[in-house]
Amino acid sequence: MSSAVTGSRSEILPGRVPRVLVVDDEPALLRAMARALRNAGFDVTTAGNGVAATELFAVHEFDAVLSDVRMPDMDGIQLLRTLRDSDVDVPVILVTGSPHALTAQQAIEHGAFRYITKPVELAVLEHTVRRAVQMREVVRLKTDASSLSNGACGAAWRTDEEASFDRALGTLWMAYQPIVSGADRKLFGYEALLRTEEPGLPHPGAMLQAAERLGRQSELARRVRTVAPGPLADDVRTGVLFVNLLPTDLMDDMLLSPDAALTAIAHRVVLEITERSSLEEVTNVRERVAALRALGFRIAIDDLGAGYAGLMSFTQLEPDIVKLDMSLVRDVHRLPTKRKLIGSLIELCKDMGILVVGEGVETSEERDVLLSLGCDLLQGYLLCRPARDLSGFSWG
Ligand code: G
Ligand code: MN
């Protein structure tokens, strides 16, 4: 942490050290969070429970509050409500060990600034607190300006898009779609696919674009990687877990963290890197991929045939698995050119010891042509749609 942290005190609040109140009933975690924030240049006060926190508000002003959700007597949600009821408009960041949709919803309804999950990554913690303090300052300035000009301006320290993104992050879940072996018709594994309950961001593409606009891609990616193992984590019979990396993921050192949820089951995880976006912006691709392999991860090229990176990604990533994009698979039984193309790609992959997945298989005709061409693995609506639970599949 410490010196690598971006931004000095003066950059956050001119001429003043921002004051943060940290509330948690677990003394060790309270100390660790307080220490990390002090090292990052915040003036930190701690409280062991919600009641003590509200009492502190009677005598101090804070620029941000970081609070555990589950605490005896007064939990984090009650603390948030108490503050709002007494018109204290401080950004509150909630921290929880059990990311439950209901709590997320409640947190957002009562105007939590953000909602982060345990195990807390100190870099995320610090970044989030920094943003909270900055937003508070923006609101202060706006409110001052509007009172001067007599205009109406609510203390909305979050934009609508931030609020929507927060709700999406809070209600994020994964759908799982089976990937099946063609040779023995047995389950090979599942791909985890991002889903949210937020109507403002109804599909993964919208969520990714919002993350990009808000500069919150790594936050989304980290959340995906934390949630993805889900029901597969403790049951090896569920096979291999395929997880989509977001374009910026390869640049995130947290991906290599030995403590991360995915790393714990790395030998059962295939990281899918899409061919749709270029790897040009990623520095040291080969080193980064080698480090992932050293942890036990396998690498797949996703959406092959849909992007422009083409076969260059083969040399950059040296994939273990290649996933043929559904645009190639669609109507392969009717289109000789597609059949030839897929046939050659499969041959090339076999030569290189790479497994091939046919994605988006919707008809038995597509399935049969893929199998006749030697495609190792199949995925698509024909076998099973993505679902919240680990579903079985039918051969179609
Ligand atoms: O880019 P990637 O291949 O990870 O995207 C997979 C997407 O395709 C998911 O959103 C999933 O819901 C969807 N999908 C999975 N199987 C099929 C299919 O058979 N047909 C169509 N149209 N979409 C599918
Ligand atoms: Mn994919």
Image (cartoon, rainbow, N blue to C red):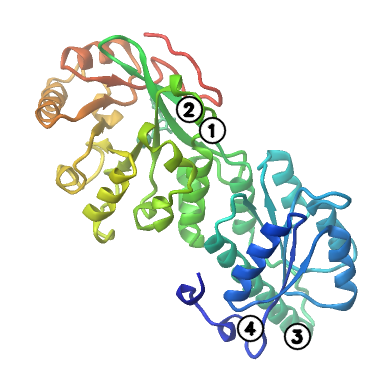
Q: Secondary structure at mark 1?
A: helix
Inter-mark Cα distance, 3 to 2:
53 Å
Q: Are marks 2 and 1 in contact (CB under 8 Å)?
A: yes
Snapshot quadrant of residue 353: top left
Q: Amino acid at mark 1?
A: Gly
User: Which of the pair 158/348 is nearer the observer?
Assistant: 348
Residue 299 placement (x, y as % from top left): 28, 39
Query: Residue at 18% of width from left, 49% of height from top?
Result: 316
Q: Secondary structure at mark 4?
A: loop
Residue 184 placement (x, y as % from top left): 29, 9
- Residue underneath mark 2: 176
Q: Amino acid at mark 4?
A: Leu
- Residue underneath mark 4: 13
Q: Amino acid at mark 2?
A: Tyr
Inter-mark Cα distance, 4 to 1:
40 Å
Q: Is residue 333 visible?
A: no
Inter-mark Cα distance, 1 to 3:
52 Å
Snapshot quadrant of residue 182: top left
Who comes first in sequence, dot 4 or dot 2?
A: 4
User: Is disc 4's CB within 8 Å of ligand 1?
Assistant: no
Who comes first in sequence, dot 1 or dot 3?
A: 3
Query: Residue at 23% of width from left, 34% of height from top?
Result: 320
Q: Residues within 10 Å of mark 3 (few under 14, many from 20)?
A: few
Query: Residue at 37% of width from left, 8% of height from top?
Result: 395
Q: Amino acid at mark 3?
A: Ser
- Residue underneath mark 3: 149
Who comes first in sequence, dot 3 or dot 2?
A: 3
Who comes first in sequence, dot 2 or dot 1?
A: 2
Q: Are marks 4 and 3 in contact (CB under 8 Å)?
A: no
Q: Nearer the viewer, mark 2 or mark 1?
A: 1
